[in-house]
Amino acid sequence: MHSHFAPSAMPDTPSLPEIKLFKDEHFLGDCLTCYGSTPYVGDGWNDTCSSIIVVNGWWQCYNDANYENPSGPPIGPRGYPVLADVGIGNDVISSVKFLRY
């Protein structure tokens, strides 16, 4: 006899790590969503982030590509409407690294 698990019986699995970068403070302007470590946010996003929502996980922001020169402390799930309030520079982020759940 074969066993089958109904979806509701499956153990909970964590969602993908997710961070949202916004071009303006208070979650305004264009938004870039990253679902894992991102060694370079791209030419259109480099040095343009002014607010962040961490949806899932703990993250480190970096001033340079390839996770060089950390900006501020690691940040966890919540909104960061003004990056300077947590020690992250405004318009300096070039890469973000997922650290842990």
Image: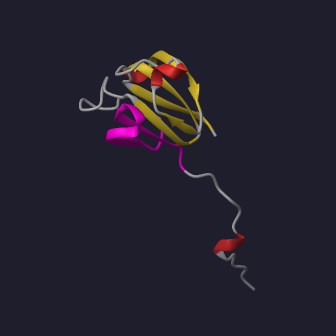
Q: Is residue 42 left or right of residue 51?
A: left
Who's the residue at 30% across and 26% down the image?
46
Residue closest to the far front:
26
Q: Taking the image as drawn, is residue 38 in sight?
A: no
Relative image position of residue 18 (x, y in whole percent): 50, 44
Secondary structure mainly formed by the magenta segment: strand
Q: Is residue 34 left or right of residue 16?
A: left
Who's the residue at 49% across and 30% down the image?
97
Q: Taking the image as drawn, is residue 11 in sight?
A: yes
Quadrant of the image for the N terminus?
A: bottom right
Relative image position of residue 22 (x, y in whole percent): 37, 36
The answer to whether residue 58 is magenta is no
Who's the residue at 69% across and 78% down the image?
4
Q: Nearer the viewer, residue 70 or 84?
A: 84
Q: Is residue 73 left or right of residue 62?
A: right
Relative image position of residue 20 (x, y in whole percent): 43, 40
Residue closest to the far top:
69
Quadrant of the image for the C terminus?
A: top right
Give the residues in magenta. 16-36
Who's the residue at 49% across and 17% down the image?
70
The answer to whether residue 19 is magenta is yes
Residue 99 sits above or below residue 47 on the image: below
Relative image position of residue 56 (x, y in whole percent): 57, 44
Residue 69 sits above or below residue 48 on the image: above
Residue 69 sits above or below residue 53 on the image: above
